[in-house]
Every structure is written in C-alpha cells, then in structure tokens.
C-alpha cells in the first residue's frame, strides 16, 4: 500500500514501512525504513546550516543523491552536459501513484535532464522494488559517469555488519561478515558478469541470527559489472548505493532517449531466515520467467563429469539408458557435441553438430532419449569463440579487441562483441535453428571467461559495451523463450558466475558451482539460499570428492536433494547396488520436491557453526515438511543432540520416523523440545518426512 500526504510518501508492506519525502527546495529525503510508525509523525527535516567544515548535503539522508554542490560522499548519479558542466541540481516536479507503484519526478534546474525515482511494493512478500528512469529532453547527448539504481539509509547510529557472499570459481557463495565502523565497504565486479567473487547485494544487520535481529537487505537485478558501496560517517550514518559499476563507465543518453536502470529489490526482516523465505517466495512469484516459475524442475542427468568433451552418440546413449532406469526425467548433453570441439581449444562459435561424433545427426540421440521417456537438453556457450573455429576465421573482428593489443585467451577463448547487431543475429539464429530443428527442452547457457581488451569500434561510446553486452544476452534469451516457451534455460558461467537477480529475471535456473563435492556444497548452497530461491539452485550428485574424503552416495544425495536435483556421475561405472541407491533417492526426491522447490526453508543448524547441517522445508499449509540432517563426522562424542524443528503449526499433530522409530508429536513439542539424536559417525545423513496426522 502507498499513502501520500502532501510531500510525504509512505510505502507499506505487510510488516514493514518505508517513508520518504521532498522539501520545498526540491531535495529528496529518506525518512524511515523498518517497523511501522504513525504516518502523521513524519516531516521532512530542515537542512541545517553549513560551514566550510560541515557540508549539509553530506549530512542529510537522501533517497538518491546527484553529484553537485557541496556533496563529497558517494553519489548515486553524475552526468556531463553538452557544455562540459558535470553537476546535477534537481528540483521536484511532482509525483504519480497507481496501485502499488509510486514515482517521484525531478528535473535539473537548467539542463534538459529528468530523473524519476520508482518504487513498487509487494505487500505479501514484504519486498519493495526500486529503480530510476533518466530522460534526455534536450537535443544533445548527456553522458553519465555514474548511474545507480538506488541509495539506502540505515536507521541506527551504531555500526552495522555487512554480510555478503564472496568466493571464487569452485567456492561460490561463501559468507563473509564485515563490521563497518567507518570509511567504506565495497562489493563489486569488473569482469563483465556478476561473477563468482562478490555478489550484487548487501545484507546489513545488528545482533541478528536466523530468527531475530534487525536485517536490512537489497539486491540488484543485473548480471554485468556492479558496485555496492556502503559508507559510515562520524555521525553514525550508514548509507549504501547499488547499481551498475562506475568503473570504466560512461553511458551516452541521446536526445529524446529514456533509460531505466536495473531494478533493486529490498526488504527489512527480523532474522536471516525470514529474509530468505521472503525473497524465495518473491522470486518464484514475481521474478522468474512465467513459463516455468510455477513448474516443478525435472531431475536431470548431465554428461559433463562423465564424458567431458568426449561425447558421441554411443556413450551418451549408454548413459541415457541407465539414467532413465534410475528415474531421470531430463538428459542433458554438455560440452563437446559441435564443430571441432574435442577439447577447449577449438569449436566455440560453430554451433552445428560434429558429424564424426554424431554421424546420423543429433536426432539419432534425441530420439533415443525421448524413447526412453526423457526430455533432451543441450549445452551451449553463445557469447564466446575459439580462435580455432570457422566463425573466427570468417569474422576475426567479431570479438572485443584493440588492434594494437594481443588478445588474452582465457580457456583458449575470446568474448564475442555482443553489442554488434550482426553478432546478436548470428547467435540468435544459431540457437533458434537448434531449437526449431530438434526436440530440445532445455538449454544450459554457459559463459566461461571474463572480458578483456574491451574495444568495440562499432560503439560511439565504447564503455557502454559493459551494459549493452548484458542487455544483448537478456534480449536473446527472452526472444528464444518467446518463440520456444516450453524450453527451460539455465544460466551457467563456469559454475555460479552468473546467478544474480538479473539472471533470474530471464533464466529459469542456474548452475550453482562446478564444485559438486558434497562437503563443500553444504556451505556453497547455504550461501546461495540467503537471497536466491532454492528452486533455481541446480545441485548434482557426482563422483567428485575434490578435497575431502569420499562420501557415501546417500550422503551426496542428501545434499543434492536440498536443491533442484541432478545427477552428474559416470553411471556406466556404478554397481547394481549404487544404481539401487540412486533409484531409491530419486523416487524419494520426486515425492518431496514440491516442498524443496516451493516450500519455506528453515536453516535449523549450520554446518560451520554447529558441525551439523539441519535444513527443513515446510509447505504453506504447515501440513507437510521434510528435514535434512547431514554431518561430516562430529567431534566430542555427540551422543545426544536436541534437534528442534521449525515452521510447523504448534496446534497440529505430526508423525515422523527417525532411525526406524516413529513419533507422533504436536508442532509445539517438535519446535520447542525436539527429538534427541545421536549425530555421530562418518557421512551421517537422514531425511525425515513430517506429516500432519
Ligand atoms: C563450465 C560449466 O560450469 C561446466 O558445468 C561445464 O558445462 C563446462 N563449462 C563445459 O565446458
């Protein structure tokens, strides 16, 4: 709900309130974010006196700060006009409100720039969306040096701790917590994609844990270079700005043009658990593409770890037959099926089938997969080219490059200049043809290297390639989805390099990490679950145990079944007993997947803090739940650990079985007393079904 009282604007969701205002000078003020207050108490404060040591613009809380006057802290927008002036001075022009949307309109006092701040409330998810529109009403270009999506102000004068998920390839989503007492905290990407290393969001908290404490969060829906910067001043004011990174940034807005920044989704909760549950629900209902957001994800098999580049009709058919026997629903052939792709040195860009590997074409395999009762999916890496490819030989100028610089070849490949229309057409046509000519129901869209030598002669303002590349990817994915609505598309970038909310607005699911080691996945998946929905998190059971002792197959299933289950091991090497374990677990997963993919997640215990991972998923009616317990060997003779459940109805009675013993207990008992378990031994794992009596 949105209420407007003179120049005070109040946005309300079920449990939160966000208040802003404008004053007679045209300044926009941030007034409140958090629990609900009486709206009659709010007014815009007087901007105090300033002197040479105290800038009033640095001191007051703004919703969106333009660069100019005596503003020295980080700003949200900075532009250069035709005559070289690089300051923006805004005046307030008015507002518009319709249903759950509010816009505040401002324009420069001299130059033909209009800036609109947008807000949209999602009341039942307790989420607010923010973005900004800039419009050039003049007849010469305006160049932005900074153009962020939103600015936030936190209420307490005491320092906040900032949680983010930093990491690297093979170690995505590892939580970090940084207390910001003074100075600045920055999370960013300069790689062209959001990347594995830092995440485009902030989670700022005080005294918080899973169930309590103030938690403020906001995530940027953008897969390109981003920057999240928080600053805390001497007076205890903490501000955060999120948006496209201003690193190597210059954005040309031509006469008459309008541009919408990427959106930001934000919220305030008590505890991290509620934050995750709200964002999961919000993403599934409002963010994910509508073609698949409400559908259960199939159990997939992926060939990468079994056959790598060495795919052919025989070995894929052999894998497919076993996959079908154990209950797989979607068979995905990964890298290696096209061009001269026998290793990572050749073939990228040549999206036609390799006839040596598939003499009778792709359909020979697809028909067999379909006959086995499974859908077929395929891997592509459309934004890339190997120098050793027909595409590169025909179009050596189709990559980002400088004539005077040698190309850095990471994984022996270069990045296609996706800002060129001819490149976009080529990529789109290849994929559209592939999907039109074959019965393909799933695409794994990979992206295996960051940008370098970012020259783009085709652009008047070459720095725009950072944004235009991401836009081109989104546009092609959207066009393909419109023409092939039954095809699901997965976002992969060397594992989890592109799993941000921008990707989630266009892709149906993501590849979480190339690290499929079950022990490491316990941590990686937890980090993922903080803000991103479980439904999108692909998790495979594989044969890989990278750095740890091998885990049992049941243990590996326990971990992978806590996401969108996939199988990636070399099934031709599995024993009959192994295959029986696969069959049993896949069948159980099919039974519980509505809970996992659409339920509410409760992180009851944390592997890092508690030595035990104890996650629980509960349906909306609180009639069914599934709990996963896993521990990789506990210390200190853990004979009796009270396992207290969450999210149930205190009044309802439930049955559950653990270790062959059946219990019938009230929700109140299960949540407040719990069941004592001996959590000991290697690869301890249990899956507990909880049903209302
Ligand atoms: C990186 C992906 O993350 C892997 O799953 C696999 O698809 C390889 N690329 C293939 O080259």
Image (cartoon, rainbow, N blue to C red):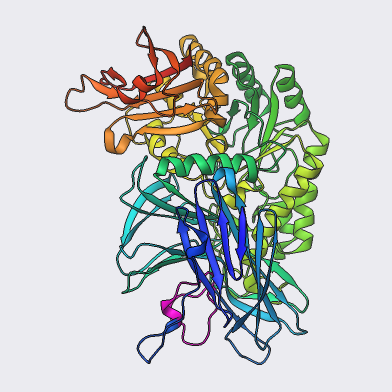
Answer with the quarter of the image where residue 211 lies.
top left
Q: Taking the image as drawn, is residue 601 in sight? A: yes
Instruction: Compare residues 685 and 594 and report the one nearer the observer.
Output: 594
Instruction: Compare residues 120 and 201 and report the one nearer the observer.
Output: 120
Is 408 left, or right, of 369 in this rendering?
Answer: left
Query: Where residue 248 appears, x then y in whole percent?
Result: 55, 73
Query: Where residue 472 appears, x then y in whole percent?
Result: 70, 58
Going 54% across and 40% down the picture, which residue do you hit?
280
Is 83 left, or right, of 229 in this rendering?
Answer: right
Q: Taking the image as drawn, is residue 227 in sight? A: no
| Quadrant of the displayed image that contains ligand 1 | top right
Going 71% across and 18% down the picture, which residue do you hit?
373
Is 570 left, or right, of 156 in this rendering?
Answer: right
Query: Where residue 157 appears, x then y in whole percent?
Result: 33, 65
Is 627 left, or right, of 367 in this rendering?
Answer: left
The magenta segment: 57-76
Q: Does residue 58 show up magenta in the picture?
A: yes
Looking at the image, which residue sits at the far front? 40
In the displayed structure, 94 sits above or below 164; it is: below
Query: Where residue 43 appears, x then y in whole percent?
Result: 50, 70
Looking at the image, which residue sits at the far left? 636
In the displayed structure, 429 sits above or below 103; it is: above
Q: Does residue 84 show up magenta in the picture?
A: no
Instruction: Compare residues 562 and 356 and report the one nearer the observer.
Output: 562
Going 72% across and 32% down the picture, which residue do you hit?
441
In the displayed structure, 385 sits above or below 40; it is: above
Q: Magenta: predominant secondary structure element? A: loop
Instruction: Compare residues 264 and 565 and report the one nearer the observer.
Output: 264
């Amino acid at each position: 709900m949105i209420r407007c009282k003179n120049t005070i604007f109040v946005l309300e969701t079920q449990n939160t309130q966000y208040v802003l205002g404008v004053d007679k000078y045209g300044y926009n003020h941030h007034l409140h974010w958090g629990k609900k207050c009486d709206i009659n108490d709010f007014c815009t404060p007087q901007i105090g006196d300033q002197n040479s040591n105290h800038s009033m613009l640095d001191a007051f809380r703004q919703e969106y700060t333009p660069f100019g006057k005596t503003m020295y802290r980080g700003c949200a927008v900075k532009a250069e006009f035709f005559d070289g002036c690089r300051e923006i001075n805004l005046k307030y022009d008015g507002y518009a409100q319709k249903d759950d949307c509010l816009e505040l309109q401002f324009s420069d006092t001299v130059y033909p720039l209009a800036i609109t701040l947008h807000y949209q409330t999602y009341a039942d998810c307790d989420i607010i969306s923010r973005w900004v529109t800039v419009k050039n009403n003049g007849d010469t270009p305006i160049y932005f040096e900074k153009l962020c999506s939103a600015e936030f102000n936190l209420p307490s004068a005491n320092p906040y701790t900032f949680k983010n998920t930093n990491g690297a390839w093979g170690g995505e989503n590892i939580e970090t917590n940084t207390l910001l007492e003074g100075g600045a905290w920055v999370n960013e990407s300069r790689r062209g994609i959001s990347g594995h290393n830092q995440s485009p969001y902030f989670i700022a908290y005080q005294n918080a844990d899973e169930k309590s404490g103030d938690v403020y969060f906001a995530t940027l829906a953008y897969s390109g270079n981003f920057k999240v910067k928080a600053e805390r001043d001497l007076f205890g004011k903490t501000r955060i700005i999120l948006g496209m990174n201003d690193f190597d940034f210059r954005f040309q807005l031509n006469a008459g043009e309008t541009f919408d920044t990427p959106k930001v989704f934000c919220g305030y909760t008590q505890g991290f658990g509620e934050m995750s549950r709200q964002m999961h629900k919000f993403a599934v209902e409002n963010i994910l593409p509508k073609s698949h957001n409400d559908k259960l994800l199939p159990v997939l098999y992926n060939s990468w770890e079994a056959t790598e580049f060495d795919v052919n009709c025989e070995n894929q058919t052999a894998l497919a037959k076993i996959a079908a026997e154990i209950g797989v629903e979607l068979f995905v052939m990964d890298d290696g099926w096209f061009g001269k792709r026998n290793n990572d040195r050749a073939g990228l860009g040549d999206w036609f089938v390799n006839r040596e590997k598939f003499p009778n074409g792709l359909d020979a395999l697809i028909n067999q997969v379909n006959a086995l009762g499974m859908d077929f999916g395929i891997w592509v890496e459309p934004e890339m080219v190997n120098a050793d490819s027909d595409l590169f030989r025909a179009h050596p100028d189709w990559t980002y490059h400088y004539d005077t610089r040698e190309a850095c070849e990471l994984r022996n490949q270069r990045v296609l200049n996706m800002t060129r229309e001819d490149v976009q057409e080529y990529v789109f046509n290849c994929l559209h043809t592939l999907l039109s000519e074959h019965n393909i129901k799933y695409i794994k869209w990979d992206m295996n290297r960051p940008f370098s030598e970012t020259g783009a002669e085709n652009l008047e303002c070459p720095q725009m390639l950072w944004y235009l590349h991401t836009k081109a990817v989104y546009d092609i994915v959207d066009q393909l989805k419109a023409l092939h609505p039954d095809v699901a598309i997965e976002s992969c970038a060397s594992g989890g390099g592109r799993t941000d909310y921008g990707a989630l607005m266009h892709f149906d699911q993501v590849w979480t990490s190339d690290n499929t080691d079950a022990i490491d996945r316990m941590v990686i998946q937890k980090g993922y679950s903080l803000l991103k929905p479980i439904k999108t998190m692909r998790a495979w059971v594989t044969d890989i145990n990278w750095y740890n002792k091998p885990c049992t197959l049941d243990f590996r299933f326990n971990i992978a079944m806590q996401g969108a289950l996939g199988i990636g091991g070399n099934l031709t090497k599995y024993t009959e007993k192994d295959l029986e374990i696969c069959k049993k677990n896949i069948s159980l997963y099919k039974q519980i997947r509505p809970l996992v993919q659409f339920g509410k997640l409760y992180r009851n215990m944390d592997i890092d803090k508690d030595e035990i991972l104890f996650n629980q998923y509960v349906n909306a009616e609180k009639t069914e739940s599934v709990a996963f317990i896993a521990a990789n060997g506990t210390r200190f003779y853990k004979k009796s650990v009270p396992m207290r459940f969450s999210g149930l109805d205190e009044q309802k009675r439930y049955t559950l079985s653990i270790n062959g013993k059946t219990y019938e207990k009230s929700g109140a008992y299960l949540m407040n007393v719990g069941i004592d378990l001996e959590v000991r031994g290697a690869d301890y794992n249990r899956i507990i079904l909880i049903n209302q009596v």
